[in-house]
Amino acid sequence: MSLDQYLSTPLLVSALVLVLTWLIFDWWNQNRKLPPGPWGWPIVGYYPYLTTTHLDFTKLSKKYGNVFSFRTIGGRLIIILNGIKTIKEVLVNRADEFDGRPHGNTIVAWMGKGLGITQEEGQPWSEHRKFFCRQPRTSASVSWKWKKESTTK
């Protein structure tokens, strides 16, 4: 065995161990900051275990609490909120902190090319909210006036 072969094998193994150790610690640090949740497979995540989604989420919430996370196909992170109090805390009381979350693959994104009101935020959301809060009152008053006028004739 020559000196080059003797040095190259330990260096290669050491470099490989170093890279794998770094990847494991990096992955561990990323997941440590997340809410608890089930472990999944490397590529498909926890997706194969989801059958009836709302029932599965209910079971997982009993095990991990009202806020849990898991990864799905391609390592995409999903965080699930359960319970009225938890959802209100996140979406109403702390809305500014959670503003700008990704829209994901929703029916609005698939069919409406991102148009709609279900996942709006910021100025468009404020304008739509004002419109929809005012609209039932104006429609009710218009229909009441119409009924009143049509019955008095």
Image (cartoon, rainbow, N blue to C red):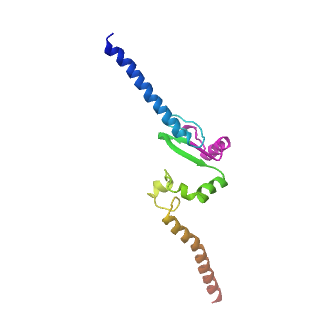
Expressed as whole percent of the image width and height from the top left, the position of residue 120 reads 50, 61
Q: How many marks?
A: 0
Q: Quadrant of the N terminus?
A: top left
In percent of width and height, residue 48 lies at: 55, 37
Considering every residue shown, the one lying at the far right of the view is 62
* Residue plotted at (57% across, 73% down): 134
State the extent of the magenta-drawn residues as a range.
47-69
Q: Main secondary structure of the magenta part?
A: helix
Q: What residue occupies the far bottom of the structure in this picture? A: 153
- Reply above or below: 115 against 28: below
Query: Residue 91 lies in what quarter of the image?
Result: bottom right
Is 101 above or below relative to 56?
below
User: To which quarter of the image does residue 58 belong?
Assistant: top right
The quarter of the rendered structure image containing the C terminus is: bottom right
Q: Is residue 56 magenta?
A: yes
Name the residue located 42 percent from the left edge and 25 percent from the top edge.
16
Question: Does 2 appear above or below 109?
Answer: above
Q: Residue at x 54, y 39 (%)?
A: 31
Given residues 114 and 52, the one toward you in this image is 114
Q: Position of residue 98 (x, y in %)?
A: 54, 55
Horizontal side, residue 85 vs residue 74: left or right:
right
Q: Percent position (x, y) of residue 41?
A: 52, 34
Verify whether residue 60 appears in magenta.
Answer: yes
Residue at image point 55% right, 67% down = 129
Vertical arrangement, residue 142 with respect to residue 127, above or below: below
